[in-house]
Image (spheres, rainbow, N blue to C red):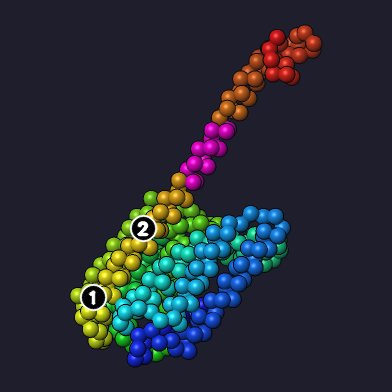
Amino acid sequence: MILAHAHHGTAGDPDLAGLVAAAACAPAVAAYAAAAARLRRRGDAWSRWRDASFASGGTALGWAAAGPLPGGPFTAHVVQHLIVGMAAPLLFVLARPLTLVLRVLPPGAGRRGLLTLAHSPGVSLLLFPPLAALIDIGGLWLLHRTGLFAAVRHLPWPHALVQAHVLAAGLLFTFSVTQLDPVRRRWSPALRGATLLGAGAAHAVLAKSLYATAPPGTAFTAADLRTGAQVMYYGGDLVEVALAVVLAGSWYAATGRAWARRHRAGPRAGRGTAVAAPREATRHTGTAGRPVGAVPPNGLRR
């Protein structure tokens, strides 16, 4: 889905590229809903909260692409950035689309090919959290602290390509931090948490720099510039806190499952050892043909 929302005159006026991007969101949401319904028809569990999350992400993208955005030109641009690069990627990742596709696809070449791609060394490298953060936050710094923003903001299709990168980089970073879908290598929560903190700090510094100085080659009003910078600062914090909650929740759930497995295995291992020792030590049979010291079938010793 390519997004564009170049501002010609009145802030928030949609252009052709934005309308095309908005129209592309509906089929994606419909395809997700159809795949989830197929799972449920065959008796598989699939949370409806994930359906709602994906639909919310698609709706937000459609609004960012073609809907009226609040504020002046720069504030509207920042709102679009928060939706395209941060909020929508989080909503999409929470919906676990890769897991859904893998469960819907029948065994065969298509499913094996998707798994091979997801577990390939190149994808694993891109999902290394610090690299994903560099691609995401580094792209935002390049856009706002060079002449790139001024060069593309009034050109619908180049602007659309920039926004497509913002969306892809946001998805990559969000996926690398949460790791909710199956991947080849799962990085530690400590590394992902530290990366999230570093990316959040870099995003906050960028917002503060924009509060003081406009992107090169632009001439926004002081009020619009400061409002946009504040929206970037506080809005980014909200999404980053949500990411931290998802990360902490997944870590807590994984730790709980591991503890439960150990807890279940412990008593079984203990019983097996206690019973095996007497059998190894006494191979002669006693009354009723049972080994001496063995436990009767009913579990009670005579």
The magenta region covers: 253-265
Q: Residues within 10 Å of mark 1 (few under 14, many from 20)?
A: many
**Residue 4, percent from left and from top:** 43, 83
Can you identify the residue that label 2 sits on? Answer: 241
Residue 152 colored magenta?
Answer: no
Residue positioned 35% across, 85% down in the render: 11
Give the Cα separation between the discs numbered 2 and 1: 23 Å
Residue furthest right in the image: 288
The residue at the point 35 percent across, 78 percent down is 70
Residue 243 image offset from top left, x and y in percent = 40, 58
| Residue in the image at 38% along x and 50% along y | 190
Q: Is residue 23 left or right of residue 112?
A: left
Asked if the residue at tag 1 contacts the one at tag 2, i.e. Cβ–Cβ closer than 8 Å, the answer is no
Residue tagged by mark 1?
A: 226
In the image, 64 versus 201, the foreground residue is 64
Residue 225 image-quadrant placement: bottom left
Query: Depth check: 53 or 127 in front?
Result: 53
In the picture shown, does residue 53 fall above or below 215?
A: above
Q: Residues within 10 Å of mark 2 (few under 14, many from 20)?
A: some
Q: How many marks?
A: 2
- Residue type at mark 1: give it: Arg
Task: Please tell me whether residue 99 is drawn above or below residue 213 in the rendered image.
Answer: above
Numbered mark located on residue 256 in the image: none
Q: Is residue 252 visible?
A: yes
Q: Which element type, helix, strand or loop, lies under badge 1?
A: helix
Residue 142 location, quadrant: bottom left
Residue 214: x %, y % from top left: 24, 80
User: Which SS does the magenta portion mostly show?
Assistant: helix
Magenta stretch holds residue 258 = yes
For residue 109, what is the image quadrant?
A: bottom right
**One can see residue 118 in this view:** no
Instruction: Using residue 265 as the reference point, say whether residue 171 is left or right of it.
Output: left
